[in-house]
Image: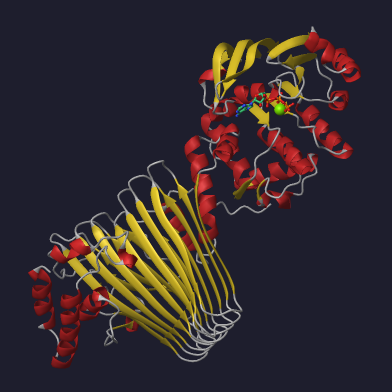
């Protein structure tokens, strides 16, 4: 481990009060002991981040950057630049906070995140409460002059039958960076959360995100994740269906840009009976990019009447493109319905030829076919502003709102 | 309008067309008939510019222009339209999206602005009426879940919307019920004009009863073995192809 982590921690913890410092010191020591996971670990086989240990990251200074059209219209905003709350742009600044991270940490990354956590969204809804507008959390990192790192932790706790829509956008703007983002979600009985997680990390940046969700009885989590960056991103999305009748629907699209590496590990644990889970992933992978998808469903003993489905489809745009997509299923109950499948295909040349025969040039015809492929995921995005922004970012033609 | 000279074409290393010569003048309808596997669809695809078909000899001129030098989308923008024998299903790309993109591609090529969305819809609705397609079906994916006959009518709808100048219809009449055949024929006739030319690939006299051809060509084993007037089609109906292939 480079000495830079220790130096950064000393500088950071010097600003904290005694109790906080001690708590974080313990987390930092755990990180220093565990380090970053290595490729010898099965879960990290395809994404080697062991090189991060030797890097010399410092906590960056506050910065102002042009967020362009990143902020979504029609939402409340909570905006972070370099990990600092941007009060002028944040209409929901009151939701910012730092919570003492709960242990134990799953790994060195979680410990690192807890040690340096600069705070983030702290959303708590009381029973029956509905968040009036979608909440757009933006965590942007400017291109720092020196290698920089940002660590944030967010928490969403929805009370019984409460409802919220939250959009996380993680974006890096170049330069050498490390970001860890952790989101902890607790849904009380009957609560409903619509969650979006968009990653657009530029080349040179590494983003490690973890979302941990625990769902009580009859609560619902719907999530859509989109990866469209050119950096290295690793996401762990862990959902525990802890109460009977809970439901999780996770849809993800990944289309790394040139040089990009995206690794999604999604896991749903059915820990209670009568729960339903759906995972749908679509990947568009070109040469000079790398995509990894690991979807895992675990049905624990007693989780009878589990209904789960996992579908992964990938489109390779070049003979040199590569994807590692694997659905996994572990079942310890007998009365369950579980389906899973993964496919890897290529663009449909017959369809391409047909569109071209109608006068549509090859580039546009391809874009239409890619949009159609991605559409299964993008169609689940209920926020038109977000859908339009992603269409544009992914190079797809705008959807035409035409009704016959 | 369309001049085909000594056309040879090959698919997957196999010679399919072995020297075709014929011309279709503006305003004319020519029928191409011939046994299964004789190369009719190959000819249609070569004219439309589908990839995978290699022209080894000969030339094709459309309004004096070398058609073979152009990619398929440019041929389409010039006014070449192929009604596919097997129309393709494209889930996730709606019929309206295809029509609009195709229309705008032509307009762009002609230096015109994109079509106004309201005008577009009105135009498509008007055309859909001619082929009795419910405009609601047009929000679905291209040909997605369409029956065989609906797909063929949809090809004609695309033709009516795009208003090509050279219409190549590859067995658009196959698999149609009697009413649909009438609808499709009416659609083709609606497009006939002194400025347009039509190439009808068909196995059946019935279509030619509705759409009178000026010339009939019989293709067998990659050659045109006989050309004649409309009476040739009736003779084939009565006698089959054997007497020609033997010749
Ligand atoms: N992609 C291909 N690969 C190999 N052979 C092909 C291919 N496409 C066509 N052929 C062959 O070329 C020959 C001509 O086929 P084509 O489809 O042009 O016939 P057709 O006259 O349209 O027949 P039909 O009346 O059955 O539609 C056939 O022997 C066919 O098997
Ligand atoms: Mg054919």
- Camera-side residue: B154 or A302? A302
Q: Nearer the viewer, residue B104 or B158?
A: B158
Res B111 seen here: no
The total number of labels drawn is 0
Residue drawn at x 60%, y 34% as measured from the top left = A358
Residue shown at 89% from the left, 37% from the top = B178
Ligand 2 image position (quadrant) = top right
At 23% from the left and 62% from the top, the residue drawn is: A142
Coloring applied to the structure: secondary structure
Residue A179 lies left or right of residue A337; in this view the side is left
- The x, y position of residue B183, in whole percent, is 83, 36
- In the rendered image, residue A106, in percent from the top left (x then y), is placed at 30, 79
Q: Nearer the viewer, residue B34 or A78?
A: B34
Viewer-closest of A309 and B87: A309
In this picture, residue A145 sits left or right of residue B173: left
Pick out the residue farthest to the right: B238
Q: Position of residue B214 (x, y in %)?
A: 80, 14
**For residue A261, which quarter of the picture?**
bottom left
| Screen quadrant of the N terminus of chain A | bottom left
Placement of B227 over or under A249, stated as above or below: above
The correct choice, above or below, for A271 with respect to B237 in the image is below
Quadrant of the image occupied by residue A176? bottom left
Is residue B114 in view from this perspective? yes
Q: Is residue A3 above or below residue A404?
A: below
Q: Position of residue B27 (x, y in %)?
A: 74, 17
Horizontal relation, residue A151 to residue B161: left or right:
left
């Amino acid at each position: 481990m480079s000495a830079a982590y220790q130096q950064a921690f000393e500088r950071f913890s010097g600003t904290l009060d005694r109790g906080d410092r001690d708590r974080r010191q313990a987390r930092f020591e755990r990180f220093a002991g565990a380090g970053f996971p290595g490729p010898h670990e099965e879960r990290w086989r395809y994404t080697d981040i062991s090189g991060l240990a030797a890097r010399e990251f410092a906590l960056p200074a506050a910065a102002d950057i042009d967020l362009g059209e990143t902020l979504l219209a029609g939402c409340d905003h909570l905006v972070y630049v370099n990990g600092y709350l941007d009060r002028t742009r944040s209409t929901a600044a009151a939701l910012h906070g730092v919570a003492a991270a709960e242990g134990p940490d799953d790994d060195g990354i979680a410990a690192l995140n807890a040690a340096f956590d600069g705070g983030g969204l702290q959303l708590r809804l009381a029973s029956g409460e509905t968040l009036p507008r979608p909440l757009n959390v933006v965590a942007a990192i400017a291109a720092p002059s020196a290698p920089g790192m940002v660590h944030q932790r967010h928490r969403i706790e929805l009370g019984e039958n409460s409802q919220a829509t939250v959009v996380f956008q993680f974006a890096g703007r170049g330069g050498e960076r490390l970001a860890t983002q952790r989101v902890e979600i607790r849904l009380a009985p009957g609560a409903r959360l619509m969650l979006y997680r968009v990653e657009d990390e530029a080349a040179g940046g590494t983003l490690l995100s973890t979302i941990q969700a625990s769902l009580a009885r009859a609560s619902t989590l719907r999530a859509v994740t989109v990866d469209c960056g050119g950096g290295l991103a690793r996401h762990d999305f862990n959902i525990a269906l802890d109460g009977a009748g809970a439901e999780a629907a996770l849809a993800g699209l990944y289309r790394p840009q040139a040089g990009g590496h995206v690794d999604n590990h999604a896991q749903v644990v059915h820990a209670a009976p009568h729960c339903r889970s759906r995972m749908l992933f679509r990947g568009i992978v070109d040469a000079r990019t790398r995509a990894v998808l690991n979807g895992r469903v675990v049905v624990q003993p007693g989780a009878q009447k589990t209904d789960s489905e996992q579908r992964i489809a990938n489109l390779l745009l070049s003979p040199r493109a590569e994807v590692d997509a694997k659905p996994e299923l572990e079942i310890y109950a007998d009365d369950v319905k579980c389906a899973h499948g993964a496919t890897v295909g290529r663009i449909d040349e017959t369809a391409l030829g047909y569109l071209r025969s109608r006068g549509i040039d090859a580039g546009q015809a391809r874009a239409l076919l890619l949009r159609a492929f991605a559409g299964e995921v993008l169609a689940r995005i209920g926020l038109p502003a977000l859908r339009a922004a992603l269409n544009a970012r992914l190079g797809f033609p705008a959807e035409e709102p035409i009704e016959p | 309008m369309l001049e085909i000279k000594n056309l040879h074409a090959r698919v997957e290393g196999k010679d399919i067309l072995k020297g075709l010569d014929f011309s279709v003048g503006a305003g004319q309808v020519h029928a191409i008939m011939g046994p299964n596997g004789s190369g009719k669809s190959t000819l249609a695809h070569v004219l439309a510019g589908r990839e995978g078909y290699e022209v080894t000899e000969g030339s094709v001129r459309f309004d004096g222009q070398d058609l073979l030098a152009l990619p398929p989308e440019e041929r389409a923008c010039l006014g070449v339209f192929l009604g596919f024998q097997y129309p393709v299903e494209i889930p996730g790309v709606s019929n309206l999206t295809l029509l609009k993109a195709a229309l705008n591609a032509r307009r762009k090529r002609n230096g015109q602005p994109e079509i106004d969305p309201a005008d577009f819809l009105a135009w498509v609705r008007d055309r859909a009426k001619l082929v009795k397609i419910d405009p609601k079906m047009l929000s679905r994916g291209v040909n997605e879940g369409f029956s065989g006959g609906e797909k063929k009518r949809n090809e004609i709808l695309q033709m009516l919307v795009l208003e090509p100048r050279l219409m190549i219809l590859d067995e658009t009449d196959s698999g149609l019920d009697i009413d649909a055949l009438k609808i499709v024929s009416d659609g083709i006739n609606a497009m006939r004009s002194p400025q347009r030319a039509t190439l009808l690939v068909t196995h059946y006299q019935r279509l030619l009863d509705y759409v009178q051809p000026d010339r009939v060509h019989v293709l067998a084993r990659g050659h045109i073995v006989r050309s004649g007037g409309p009476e040739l089609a009736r003779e084939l109906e009565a006698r089959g192809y054997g007497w020609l292939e033997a010749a």
